[in-house]
Image (cartoon, grey):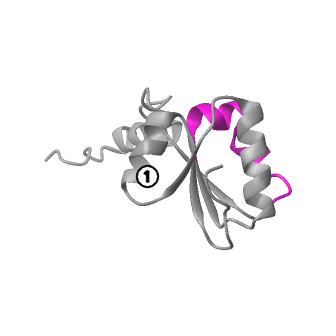
Amino acid sequence: MDAHASNGTLWVLGDAATVMGFRLAGLRGWVVESAAEARSALDALRAERAALVVLTETLCDALGGPEALARGATLPVVAVIPSVAGPRVLVSPGARIARAVQRALGIPAEGRA
């Protein structure tokens, strides 16, 4: 970790390219390359009471998914973003269901007349 987290901070955990992009935007980042490193980083950020951690999908999956991350902890709030290779699912299941319902009801898709 290149600096200690402090109460109310936002951190990004992920691969080097993702972290670098967020650092260029002025956010703190921690490059992690394995689930063990990610767990250690999250534990340190929880201990320091970080407010928000942005985590790549790849790391989220390696840590057991969003449900596992949310279990038993109120802080930090964890936001999951697509990994450097792109989103795991290009269209969410919810969006597919919404489109199917719209088609069934005869509602035109957004952007079409």
Does 86 sit left or right of 65 as displayed? left
Which residue sits furthest front?
A: 2
Residue closest to the eye, 64 or 7:
7
In percent of width and height, residue 3 lies at 63, 58
Q: Residue at x 81, y 59 (%)?
A: 73
Does 45 sit left or right of 104 as displayed? right
Which residue sits furthest bottom?
A: 7
Above or below for 25 versus 111? below
Residue 1 is covered by the magenta coloring: no
Residue 56 is covered by the magenta coloring: yes
Does 64 sit left or right of 52 as displayed? right
In percent of width and height, residue 51 lies at 65, 67
Q: Which residue is mark 1?
A: 23
Q: Residue at x 37, y 52 (%)?
A: 24
Does 17 sit left or right of 76 as displayed? left
Tell me where the magenta segment starts and ends, as one range: 55-74
What is the secondary structure assignment of the residue under circle 1?
helix
Picture quadrant where residue 64 is located: top right
Q: Residue at x 71, y 39 (%)?
A: 38
Q: Amino acid at mark 1?
A: Arg
In percent of width and height, residue 66 lies at 69, 44
Residue closest to the eye, 45 or 79:
45
Q: Is residue 24 visible?
A: yes
Magenta span dominant secondary structure: helix
In percent of width and height, residue 112 lies at 16, 44
